[in-house]
Image: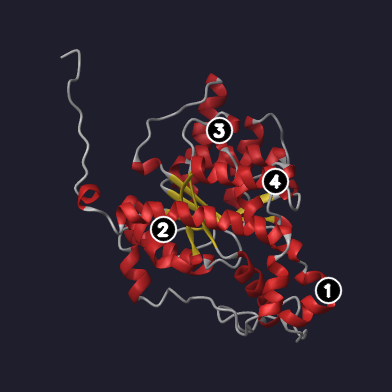
Amino acid sequence: MDCDVDIDCYNSLFEVENKFFGRKLPITTYALYFRANFCDSQTNDAVVQIQNELKDNVKSDVRIYKPTNYEEVVIIYNRVPKTASTSFVGLVYDLCKQNKYHVLHINVTNNMHTLTLFNQIQFVNNISRWNAIKPAFYHGHTAFLNFEKFGVKQTPLYINILRKPLDRFISYYYFLRYGDNFRPHLIRKKHGDTKTFDECVNIGQPDCDPNNMWLQIPFLCGHDPACWEVGNKWALEEAKRNLQRHYLLVGVTEELAEFVQILQIVFPRFFKGAYESFLYNNKSHLRQTTQKIDPLPETVEKIQKTVVWKMENELYNFALTHFHAVKKRLISASLQDSNQRFMYEKIRPK
């Protein structure tokens, strides 16, 4: 059963955090806050525990790190908009009680995707030290943040889902006008604008400017300002490096079922039963844009000539190749891979 965390508990949590950093700030000055959905009522216990841990650390002035185990794991899903993220997160919430982990939504003010340096420190500290809430799954529309930069030894596991860039762009265009079947009565930002995507492109309207496709690259690239410079070649390469080095798995919207299946195989602590639930509990189409018109071939050709589409598509194909390599050895495994084991031997001294 989901329940919202009492804001008083968060006030006391952040007051202790501020003292730890030598600053006493009112809760209203924070740009970052959490809307946490717990599967059981442990809010006060969680706050009390982190208060005690922080007090102990202040006294000793030493950071305490415990050995890694599955009960201390944190997963961060920095979800890209319009990539089937709501469908996937719905599945994660469905499983949290039976698999005994907590799910928390990261909600940044004004829907910003990056944090100030101060809030980056707070974010890293909160997630790393909030032991009472572990194992935990955090999700939100935020850019990748490298925890190693802040001296954290036990870093979270990142996952993500990418989508064909033009498909994602078109879906978002119509979503702003017609909404979706998840919250059908909510009036969207562009409600009443009936222009098709083709018409929008032909007249050069700002919200169908191809530069607006620049989103999946910066989400994987991170918080460096260069990540958010449209067309920046370093940002594309950094996004690729981060995918290889810091992400447990990056799937694609077009193969969402296989993404779920792989997560169940490699990380059953969180995802036991996920694949069956996804297939048979009607979660595969939880959220769909109410009205969407496929673009004309000439519109597609025009978009695909742009630098931004080519770069975003390059990242998508890079992620797809990487995902297929993982899938081949797990789902379509050869006899050699399916029978693979490892062991330890010749251990010295005896």
User: Which residue position is annotated with label 1?
Assistant: 204
Residue nearest the observer in this picture, 257 or 31? 257
Say if mark 1 contacts mark 3, CB within 8 Å: no
Label 4 secondary element = helix
The amino acid beneath tag 4 is: Lys
Question: Circle 1: is it few (<14), some (14-19), or many (20+) Cα within 10 Å?
Answer: few
The amino acid beneath tag 1 is: Gly
Mark sitting earlier along the chain (3/4)? 3
Is residue 147 shown above or below 254? Answer: above
Say if mark 4 contacts mark 1, CB within 8 Å: no
Q: Quadrant of the N terminus?
A: bottom left
User: Which residue position is annotated with label 3?
Assistant: 148
Distance (Cα) linking label 2 and label 4: 45 Å
The amino acid beneath tag 3 is: Glu
Mark sitting earlier along the chain (2/4)? 2
Distance (Cα) linking label 1 and label 3: 43 Å
User: Which residue position is annotated with label 2?
Assistant: 40
Label 1 secondary element = loop
Residue 222 at x, y percent in the picture: 64, 45
The circle drawn on residue 275 is none
User: Which residue position is annotated with label 4?
Assistant: 233
Question: Circle 4: is it few (<14), some (14-19), or many (20+) Cα within 10 Å?
Answer: few
Residue 10 at x, y percent in the picture: 60, 49
Mark sitting earlier along the chain (4/1)? 1
Q: Is residue 6 visible?
A: no
Q: Is residue 186 left or right of residue 348?
A: right
Residue nearest the observer in this picture, 30 or 151? 151
Distance (Cα) linking label 2 and label 1: 50 Å
